[in-house]
Amino acid sequence: MADGKILGWVGGGCAQPVVTTEAQKALADGKPRMVRISHSSAHLTEGVVNYPMTCHSSGAMDIYIEPVLPRPHLLILGRSLVAQTLARLGAAMNYAVTVVSPEPDADNFPGVNLIVRSDFRLDDLKVTAETWLIISTQGEGDEEALEQALKASATYIGFVASRTKAQKVFEYLRGKGIPAQKLDQVRAPAGLNLGARSPEEIAVSILAEMVQLKAAQGRVRDSAGALPTIEQTVKDPICGMTVDSAKAKYKSNYAGAVFYFCCAGCKQTFDQQPEKYTHAA
């Protein structure tokens, strides 16, 4: 899991911290990887993440890690022609699509999760960082829909409206006490400026903007590096394996410092001659 929790068994003290760290990296950047934990450096392979292992075990492990990520969620408020086209195209792009509207026609939204709700309330829906939220009410509850959308934690909020109409709705919501910084999060008009006019073209421009933003987010992650969420990793002074100090079962105190080990054998070796390994640690 993203928090480092493991279901099942991937090996003992040497293997588990490595697998946890690399799996968290895979969840962060969305890319699979092959990881090798081995005593020998004679079989280094390009594209394989190699970890040295000098524990008592003389075996080796090759672990293939492939992230399983949730589908992006397209949440549409409204039943307009743009909303209908967005739902169809979003489903074709393998998005999980949810439509919320007071009076939707099920025939216009085939194969999507349809929720009938007069007030556009979203507090019982699962809205995450993978949710892309589009308000396409177009005159049918614009203010109510946008107000509810601003309460959610979607990665993107787009409002299908002209700039003039959007500003009128923003003025109304500011009068209700919604902070300006919240309204600044809304992309209005939603979509890239492609000169779109028809409902189909507008829907394509919105999805194109979403694709562009997703690609930009991926480039930011790549340039920053995939950072695992384990923050307290240290190196076993005996074998050199990575150990999560918060969960380490084996540790020793020497010269005012704490040393952590992947297994009882490494701790025993250290305790016999701690001064020998202090510098390496």
Image: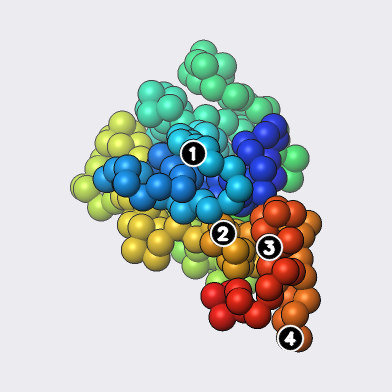
Q: Nearer the viewer, mark 2 or mark 3?
A: 3
Which residue bears the numbered disc 1? 60
> Which badge, 2 or 1, is on the more N-terminal residue?
1
Which residue bears the numbered disc 3? 269
Mark drawn on residue 255: 4
Q: Is residue 281 visible?
A: yes
Q: Amino acid at mark 4?
A: Ala
Is the C-beta separation of discs 2 and 3 under 8 Å? no
Kindly identify the residue that appears in the image at 25 percent across and 52 percent down: 193
The answer for how far apart the CA atoms under marks 2 and 1 are is 14 Å
Above or below 231: residue 76? above
**Mark 1: few/some/many CA within 10 Å (<14, 14-19, 20+):** some
Q: Picture coordinates of residue 274 (x, y %)?
A: 68, 75
**Mark 4: few/some/many CA within 10 Å (<14, 14-19, 20+):** few
Q: Secondary structure at mark 1?
A: loop
> Which badge, 3 or 1, is on the more N-terminal residue?
1
The answer for how far apart the CA atoms under marks 2 and 3 are is 10 Å
Q: Quadrant of the C terminus?
A: bottom right
The answer for how far apart the CA atoms under marks 3 and 1 are is 21 Å
